[in-house]
Image (spheres, helix red, strand yellow):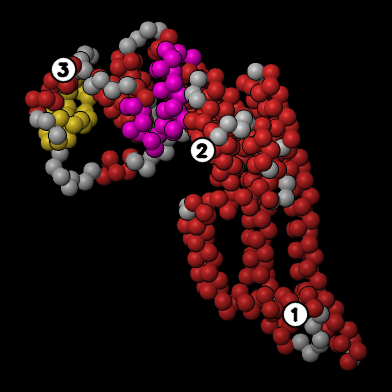
């Protein structure tokens, strides 16, 4: 088998280009004809050929909106009774994201070759998550693909919403820290140097704030490049550490311990856990497999590990309530509602209640955090200004007193 780049025309005469695996050029033409395309040319791609466009396309980001829109459109195609391959061709033409468009084209080709839709999706892990593929596979097996696509759209929209909530929760604290840091650096490098020569030649005892300010100024003047290098190295080390399994686990566990923000992150994870679990159970995926998928959807490696441990306990026949308690991360409300659902046979409804509750709690918590951060920012800036004012003006008062006394 070799890779061939082809050019063909569709039923409207529009030129279509792409690539496919085939034994020879004749096989390419046969496949194009089966796809309803009129072959124009097919050239074998030589080994080692480098296409910059294809390379860059791998890094093109697919927005949540793109994937949600594709899923909604595909649901409409299934509802209308349009054959999958024909529907995918129509969606390919309507998709603006080049990476997603190429993926849809390849998926259509794979289905035309006899692959199932879920198997075709699984070849594009960078675009379609395991959650997405698993729900589609469950829909194919149960014959309810249209309902699954609707439910999947809801899951994707929910994940996008909770992701935005998490960004909102972290955005303001980061803004405060960065703002205070930039203001301090600007003052130290722009304002303070104008007073340093005067203070160093002054014949009076410098007050403590001024001495601290001079030490800080010396550090900035003498070790600026070293500090930048250390900061850059620390940032890169943090990024690489975060990409390791142990690093991601440790950092995500630390996030949950942060004041104020940690509780918001926990609530977001609980909402994701309950919502995703509910939808996967309704889809008909076995509970062990469901929890494995949910662990990858909660968005926190520490909680994901706990969910995987729960799956192992359930596999041993311990039910779900006791492992939830043993995990010591799930709030009592979650445990109580899930236990009630397990006992009454209404687990899906209870999970929905958990999701709705924490979704609402996150909105309130983010609003409260914003209200609390504003006075912190004001106090921080005021404290910085006060420190600089004391450090700069106290020596002037002492010098003025000395001059008057000397006069």
Cα separation between marks 3 and 2: 41 Å
Mark 3 lies on a secondary structure that is helix
Left or right placement of residue 262 versus residue 13 in this view: right
Cα separation between marks 1 and 2: 52 Å
The residue depicted at 49 percent of the width and 30 percent of the height is 289
Left or right placement of residue 128 versus residue 93 in this view: right
Which image quarter holds the N terminus?
Answer: top left
Mark 1 lies on a secondary structure that is helix
Up-down relation of residue 352 to residue 206 (above or below): above
Residue 296's tag is 2
Residue occupied by mark 3: 33
Q: For label 2, count other residues whose C-alpha is less than 10 Å away and answer few (under 14), some (14-19) or many (20+).
A: some
Residue occupied by mark 1: 211
Cα separation between marks 1 and 3: 83 Å
Please say whether residue 292 is one of the residues in the magenta stretch: no
Of 188 and 327, which appears nearest the observer? 327
Up-down relation of residue 37 to residue 376 (above or below): above
The residue depicted at 69 percent of the width and 51 percent of the height is 258
Q: Give the label, 1 or 2, closer to the camera.
A: 2
């Amino acid at each position: 088998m070799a890779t061939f780049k082809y050019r063909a025309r569709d039923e409207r005469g529009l030129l279509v280009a792409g690539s496919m695996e085939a034994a020879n050029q004749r096989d390419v033409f046969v496949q194009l004809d089966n796809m309803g395309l009129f072959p124009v040319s097919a050239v074998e791609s030589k080994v080692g050929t480098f296409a910059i466009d294809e390379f860059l396309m791998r890094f093109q980001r697919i927005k949540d909106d793109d994937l949600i829109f594709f899923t909604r459109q595909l649901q409409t195609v299934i509802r209308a009774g349009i054959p999958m391959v024909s529907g995918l061709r129509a969606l390919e033409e309507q998709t603006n994201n080049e990476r997603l468009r190429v993926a849809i084209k390849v998926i259509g080709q794979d289905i035309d070759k006899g692959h199932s839709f879920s198997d075709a999706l699984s070849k594009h892990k960078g675009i379609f998550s395991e959650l997405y593929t698993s729900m589609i596979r469950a829909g194919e097996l149960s014959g309810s693909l249209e309902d699954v696509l609707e439910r999947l759209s809801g899951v994707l929209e929910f994940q996008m919403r909770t992701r935005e909530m998490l960004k909102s929760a972290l955005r303001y604290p980061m803004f405060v820290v960065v703002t205070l840091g930039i203001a301090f650096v600007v003052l130290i490098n722009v304002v303070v140097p104008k007073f340093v020569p005067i203070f160093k030649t002054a014949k009076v005892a410098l007050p403590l704030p001024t001495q601290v300010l001079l030490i800080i100024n010396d550090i900035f003047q003498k070790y600026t490049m070293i500090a930048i290098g250390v900061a850059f190295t620390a940032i890169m080390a943090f990024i690489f550490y975060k990409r390791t399994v142990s690093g991601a686990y440790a950092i995500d566990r630390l996030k949950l311990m942060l004041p104020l923000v940690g509780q918001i992150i926990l609530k977001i994870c609980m909402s994701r856990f309950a919502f995703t679990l509910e939808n996967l159970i309704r889809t008909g995926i076995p509970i062990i497999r469901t929890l494995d998928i949910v662990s990858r959807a909660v968005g926190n490696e520490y909680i994901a590990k706990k969910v995987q441990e729960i799956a192992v306990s359930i596999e041993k026949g311990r039910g779900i309530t006791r492992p939830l308690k043993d995990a010591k991360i799930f709030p009592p409300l979650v445990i109580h509602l899930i236990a009630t659902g397990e006992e009454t046979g209404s687990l899906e409804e209870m999970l929905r209640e958990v999701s709705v509750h924490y979704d609402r709690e996150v909105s309130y918590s983010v609003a409260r955090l914003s209200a609390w951060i504003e006075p912190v920012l004001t106090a921080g800036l005021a404290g910085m200004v006060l420190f600089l004012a004391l450090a700069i003006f106290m020596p002037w008062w002492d010098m003025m007193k000395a001059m008057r006394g000397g006069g």
